Image (tube, helix red, strand yellow):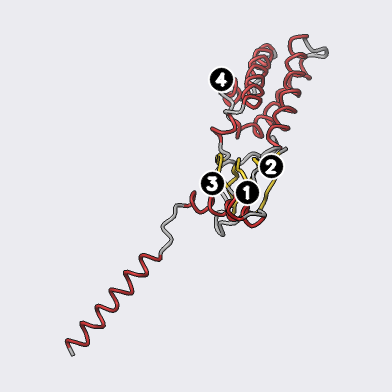
Amino acid sequence: MNKTFRKNALLALALAFFALLSCDRRSEEEKRADAIAAFVMDYANNYNSYKVVDLKKIDQAYLEGQQIIKSSLKILQDTTRTKLSYLALSNSQMDMTKLVSWSEKLPIDAVDSYLTESAKVDRLLDEHWAEQPAELSMARANEANALNSLNDALALFNLSIYSIDLAEGASTIYYHQFEVDGMEKSAIFEVDNQAFSVIAYKELG
């Protein structure tokens, strides 16, 4: 009985050991990278020709590091400061806490909220000044141009100024440079965070 028990115990331990070895120990980042690699290789004429050049997660730090986005956000901060100065002259009772904060640092994922607050400010300023001061008019024109540039830049990553959610959610977006069949390419990939599969792909020109 003891012999049988020991054999069964050893067998159970062996099975547990092999099960442990077979567990997928890859991190979620590695699983997403592997999903992208598998997707590219499925479409390659030469399966072994795929080489990674660069792979970056599209997050707040990445987007704010792009020059056109950085410049556009700086213009929006300048615009906010101008609007605040004219808002103060209008004796408005509007809560300016967010605007003051954004005049110093406007995060990319706050731009959709910025649009709402900026529209409120514009309405108040329009009510106070029948004819806009030249400085305010120029600031609003610069704001419109910056928002257009920002939206164009975000569109490359399948994002929009009207909806920017960079928090961990159902999917993660990556910018990927790679070589396949001897040609270097770059593309945007969206990877499902549950199934670890590519759900959207956009090749960049």
Camera-near label (2 vs 3) is 2
Nearer-the-camera pick, 177 or 119: 177
**In the rendered structure, which amino acid carries the disc numbered 1?**
Glu
10 Å crowding of disc 3: few (<14), some (14-19), many (20+): few
Q: Nearer the viewer, mark 2 or mark 4?
A: 2
In the rendered image, the vertical position of residue 36 relative to residue 6, given as above or below: above
- Mark 4 or 1, nearer chain start: 4
Q: Position of residue 98 (x, y in %)?
A: 58, 26
Q: Earlier in the sequence, mark 2 or mark 1?
A: 2
Quote the CA–CA distance across marks 4 and 1: 32 Å
**Amino acid bearing label 2:** Asn
Q: Residue furthest left?
A: 2
How much space separates mark 1 and mark 3, taking CA atoms? 13 Å
Q: Are marks 2 and 1 in contact (CB under 8 Å)?
A: yes
Q: Residue at x 77, y 18 (%)?
A: 141
**Label for residue 168?**
3
Amino acid type, callout 4: Glu
Foreground: 202 or 92?
Answer: 202
- Going from the N terminus, do you reach mark 3 or mark 4 first? 4
Pointer 4 residue: 104
Q: Which residue is mark 2?
A: 158
Is the residue marked by circle 4 packed among few (<14), some (14-19), or many (20+) residues within 10 Å?
Answer: few
Residue type at numbered disc 3: Glu
| Nearer to us: label 4 or label 1 | 1
- Residue at figure coordinates x 59%, y 54% from the top left: 192
**Do residues under tags 2 and 4 come within 8 Å of each other at their CB atoms?**
no
Disc 3 and disc 4 in contact, CB within 8 angstroms: no
- Residue lying furthest top: 134
| Mark nearer the viewer, 1 or 3 | 1
Sequence-wise, the earlier of marks 2 and 4 is: 4
Decide: marks 1, 3 in contact (CB < 8 A)? no
